Structure formats: structure tokens, C-alpha cells
Image: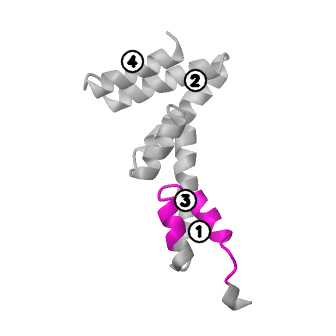
Amino acid sequence: MPYRKRLMVATATVAAGLMSNAHASESAIQAYCLEKWSGEAMRAYCQEEQREAAEAIASYGGPVRSRCESEWRADFHMVLFCIKEQQRLSHAAVADAARDETTTRCAHEWPHTYNLQALCITERPVDSAAN
């Protein structure tokens, strides 16, 4: 069965309540790694990496997780990377920034995309009163 079809079947079965999320994740992991790697050793490595990432993702929630999951779908390793990167950028560039007008505007324009918030803040126009 092709990768996309397996993934759709696993998703539909979970939605119908017929399969647990853990089993669906395992089905998605196997389908993803089978599609990506032809060699058994690399496929096994891929599956282990994906299982570890899927377990770690379970501890996250909210709009960042949802956005990363919709962007990376069954690539749990990249979903986890996306979540961590968004959090890092959020903490480093947005949460610690002064809550001035520009920061508020950037947060409003990019509510769930912290890397774009950070870019917006760092590229804000120079205050003409300071010159």
C-alpha cells in the first residue's frame, strides 16, 4: 500500500476511534520510513528516530504543535525540531523583547509564527526621534 494511502487509513482509523494514537503513530512511522529508505539498516534507524520524536511530541501542545504537525505531517523528527525551534525563537527574540508598539504589532501580525515575529522585531524601523 502506498505511503499516502497508509497514512490516510491510519488517520481515518484513529478519527473513528478504532485504533490508538500509539498504533497510528507506529503505522505512520513504518510507512514514512519505508517510503524514505530502501535499505533495512537505514529504515530501522529512521523508525527508531521517529519513535523517539513521536514520544517527545506527546508532551507538547497548543498552536505551535498543531502548525508544525500540519507542516511536517508524519515526519515526527521534523515536527519535534519545528516545535523546539519555534520555542527557542519565541523565548530568545519575542518573550524577552520590550513590549513596545513594534513588538505588539509583530506579535499581532504573526501570532503563531515566532521566527517571523523575531524577524519583524529585528527589522523594525529606526525611531526617527532617536536620530
Earlier residue among tags 4 and 3? 4
Q: Position of residue 43 (x, y in %)?
A: 61, 22
For the residues marked 4 and 1, what is the alpha-carbon distance in whole angstroms? 40 Å
Q: Which mark is residue 9?
A: 4
Query: Disc 3 or disc 2, which is closer to the eye?
Result: 3
Amino acid on which the number 3 mark rests in the picture: Tyr
Neighbours of disc 1 within 10 Å: few (<14), some (14-19), many (20+): few
Residue 6 appears in the picture as rendered: yes
Residue 95 appears in the picture as rendered: no
| Residue hosting label 2 | 33
Earlier residue among tags 2 and 1? 2
Residue at the image position 39 percent from the left and 22 percent from the top: 10
For the magenta stretch, what is the residue range? 104-127
| Residue hosting label 1 | 92
Query: Disc 3 or disc 1, which is closer to the eye?
Result: 3
Q: Position of residue 21 (x, y in %)?
A: 34, 31
Earlier residue among tags 3 and 2? 2
Figure quadrant of residue 37:
top right
Query: Disc 4 or disc 3, which is closer to the eye?
Result: 3
For the residues marked 4 and 3, what is the alpha-carbon distance in whole angstroms? 33 Å
Magenta-colored segment: predominant secondary structure: helix
As displayed, is residue 117 above or below residue 75? below
| Residue hosting label 3 | 114
Residue at the image position 54 percent from the left and 73 percent from the top: 103
Neighbours of disc 2 within 10 Å: few (<14), some (14-19), many (20+): many
Amino acid on which the number 4 mark rests in the picture: Val
For the residues marked 2 and 1, what is the alpha-carbon distance in whole angstroms? 34 Å
For the residues marked 3 and 1, what is the alpha-carbon distance in whole angstroms? 10 Å
